[in-house]
Amino acid sequence: MSRPGAAARAPEGARGGGAASGALPDGVLRVEEQIVVLFRRAKVLWASAAASVHPDLQPVGYRLLSTLVRLGPTNPGRLAEIIETDKSVVSRQARVLEALGLVTTEPDPHDGRGRLLRATSSSSELVESTRQRVLEHLKAGLAGLTDEELNQLALLMTRLNDAVESSGFALDPPAR
């Protein structure tokens, strides 16, 4: 029996060569499979982290809050760019975060019409303790790797992220 959330594996020889795959090398398909697993686990992690800060906090709100904790006071437009989401999502989440007592707003000293969002000290502490717990779990999960393997993994992940970014990777929306 497989672990919950474990990647389903295609039978040997079942990968590559299909019309949909365009006969991609098996390594590319295995990387894609692992990215899907990683995204699925990251989604669960974001939800768990959000709930550990406040039971009514959504994962996107946690991403916004953790970004504020990392960067300090930031305007909503910049936050939308950083977490790569629409400004309307940031506006809605900022209202939720403020209602939950996790952020405050203040005038932007560089733009008299603008506002800055700031994480409260208590929410900063919650985010930091959550981050430390996540790092401890990650450390435990990676304990079987040598320092050399960890460095190689980090290098390969960096190269993957750089390659994806430089390729302008984005799926075109389906034709209507």
Image (cartoon, helix red, strand yellow):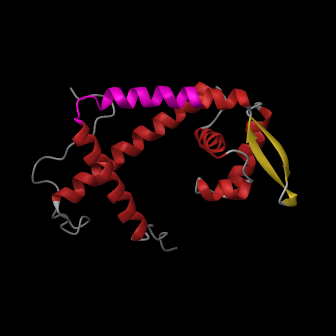
Residue at the image point whose x is 77% and y is 30% from the top = 101
Q: Main secondary structure of the magenta part?
A: helix
Residue 76 at what x, y percent from top left?
73, 53
Report if residue 48 is visible in the image: no
Magenta stretch? 128-146
Residue at the image point whose x is 23% and y is 30% from the top = 144
Residue 59 at what x, y percent from top left?
58, 39
- 71 to the left or right of 38: right
Q: Residue furthest left?
A: 13
Question: Is 91 covered by the magenta stretch?
Answer: no
Question: Is 145 covered by the magenta stretch?
Answer: yes
Q: Residue furthest front?
A: 147
Residue 77 at what x, y percent from top left?
71, 58
Report if residue 121 is visible in the image: yes
- 89 to the left or right of 20: right
Residue at the image point whose x is 9% and y is 54% from the top = 13
Residue 141 at what x, y percent from top left?
32, 29
Which is more toward the observer, 133 or 96?
133
